[in-house]
Amino acid sequence: MTTQQARTSVADLTTTRATDPGAITRGWAARERRPLLGGDGRMLLVAADHPARGALGVRGDRLAMASRSDLLRRLATALSRPGVDGVLGTPDVLDDLLLMGALEGKVAIGSMNRGGLQGSAFELDDRFTGHTAAEIVARGIDGGKMLTRIDLDDPASVATLEASARAVTELAAHGTMAMVEPFWSTRRDGKVVNLLDPDSTIHSITVASGLGASSAHTWLKLPVVDELERVMDSTTLPSLLLGGDPQGDPRDAYAAWGRSLQIPQVRGLVVGRALLYPPDGDVAAAVDIAADLVHGGAA
């Protein structure tokens, strides 16, 4: 997809949204779906839910994700590559991709809570402002993801825990994936910081694993941390590892992902900025490397 095509697509998307908003409902009803997992039992998802939380930065560029036409171009390129199973996004992004025809035969995961805006005083009161469980089921979206940050010193965390538990229960009742992304968090100089040491990650996993009335359809979305094999031994839930905000040499991240994928509980990757905004700008090449890591060349 060229830059000009992306711009044309954005113009078409706006026209459709203005003159025929029902096209979105019809599109979800007609979308070609696929099993959650392929034959190898692994999954590579591209994440695109950062903008709705006000998190637009990549490396040193605070507004790297501000251009919707550029983001959609990058997402379309990523989703066109072999071995990319699908995308995680908020309703606005998924609806755009749906209208573009980019979600046919792909896994679509809806991002449920984006209310904890980056840098806000209420960041840990992470309200569910995106997809609801009922809408995920009604649209035939394949799962719902919830960010669940836990700060023992912040009373707002319990509201997020309760809302996440409710979403897990509601999704499980319909046989739909609930993807919980837990962090043990704290505030330093007024800023929310996720604690990425092994023991803190284990604590977050054990709390997240117990959310909801059923764990039958619960998956975890977890950071790559030290001693990951010991960390993953704290759960039996299938897990996807996140890519995070890329820093340093991308080859270091690829090496860490490759090692992590040898752990049985790890079933794949959810990567956003590291693949969509690689240092050299070659989205297709970055995505192809990740797909080969996840699917072992079988894609």
Image (cartoon, rainbow, N blue to C red):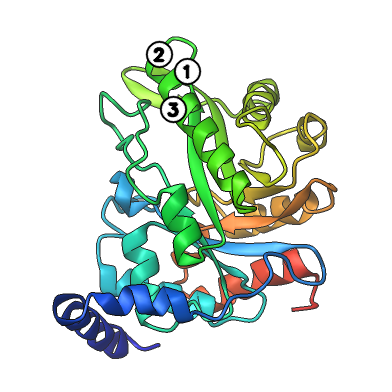
Q: Is residue 6 left or right of 75 when viewed as pictured?
A: left
Looking at the rendered image, the disc whose residue lies closer to the viewer, 1 or 3, is 3
Mark number for residue 154? 2
The alpha-carbon separation of the residues under discs 2 and 1 comes to 5 Å
- Hey, what amino acid is under mark 3? Thr
- Hey, what amino acid is under mark 2? Asp
Q: Mark 1 falls on what kind of element?
A: loop
Which residue reaches farthest top?
A: 153
In what quadrant of the picture does the C terminus appear?
Answer: bottom right
In what quadrant of the picture does the N terminus appear?
Answer: bottom left
Q: Nearer the viewer, residue 169 or 69?
A: 169
Q: Mark 2 falls on what kind of element?
A: loop
- Hey, what amino acid is under mark 1? Asp
The alpha-carbon separation of the residues under discs 1 and 3 comes to 11 Å
Residue at 59%, 29% (x, y): give it. 196
- Place residue 82 in its image quadrant: bottom right
Looking at the rendered image, the disc whose residue lies closer to the viewer, 3 or 2, is 3
Q: Which residue is mark 1?
A: 151
Mark number for residue 160? 3
The residue carrying pointer 1 sits among few (fewer than 14), some (14 to 19) or many (20 or more) residues within 10 Å by Cα, namely many
Q: Mark 3 falls on what kind of element?
A: helix
